């Protein structure tokens, strides 16, 4: 007699295992894609912070050379509502809340920073810059810097 072969293709178990493996791979891929997007956003925020710090430093040099307060753009006086503690050379530095200028989009354009959607608090004398819109990166780094450490 002829023996009948009951194999009719892919079994349900193999199909379920394949779908599970594909879902795991998709999940891992999405996880790393989201992490990379957050990393890129952090780098953009830090880069813009440094650009503002450099532009503020240039404005302060112009002010020192001419004595013209027009180079100190922004809304003044501006007091920070946040307490910022920043680590410099293994010691915490607490930032003084008074004596700041607030730079909005128009003021930033005056000093050469275009298309920024953030506002900054700056101290021309010390070169301190703080992003008052975002405050910190997604990874928790405070968006504060100063050129004259």
Image: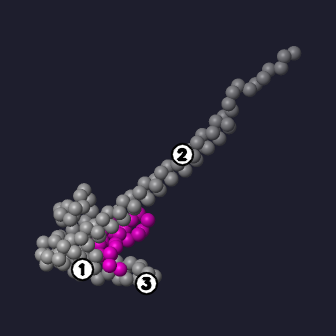
Please tell me which residue lies in front, 148 or 132.
148
| Badge 3 density bin: few <14, some 14–19, many ≥20, Cα 10 Å | few
Q: Which residues are magenta?
A: 128-149
Residue on which the image places disc 2: 26
Chief secondary structure of the magenta span? Answer: loop
Circle 2: element type: helix
Vertical comparison of 28 with 136: above or below:
above
Q: Nearer the viewer, residue 126 or 98?
A: 126
Q: Residues within 10 Å of mark 1 (few under 14, many from 20)?
A: some
**Of callouts 1 and 2, the N-terminal one:** 2
Picture coordinates of residue 40 (x, y %)?
41, 57
Specify which label sits upstream in the sequence, 3 or 2: 2
Task: Give the residue number, with chain letter if any, for mark 1.
Answer: 125
**In the orientation shown, which residue stands out farthest toward the right?**
1
Q: Real-space Cα distance between discs 1 and 3?
A: 22 Å
Q: Is residue 114 magenta?
A: no
């Amino acid at each position: 007699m002829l023996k009948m072969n009951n194999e009719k293709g892919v079994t349900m178990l193999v199909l379920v295992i394949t779908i599970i493996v594909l879902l795991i791979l998709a999940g891992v891929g999405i996880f790393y894609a989201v992490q990379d997007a957050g990393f890129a956003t952090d780098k953009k925020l830090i880069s813009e912070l440094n650009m503002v710090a450099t532009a503020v430093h240039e404005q302060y040099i112009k002010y020192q050379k001419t004595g013209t307060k027009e180079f100190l753009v922004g809304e003044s006086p501006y007091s920070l509502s946040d307490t910022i503690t920043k680590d410099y050379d293994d010691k915490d530095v607490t930032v003084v809340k008074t004596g700041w200028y607030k730079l909005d989009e128009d003021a930033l354009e005056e000093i050469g920073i275009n298309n920024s959607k953030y506002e900054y608090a700056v101290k021309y004398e010390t070169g301190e810059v703080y992003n008052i819109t975002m405050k910190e990166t997604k990874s928790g780094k405070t968006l504060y810097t100063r050129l004259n450490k």
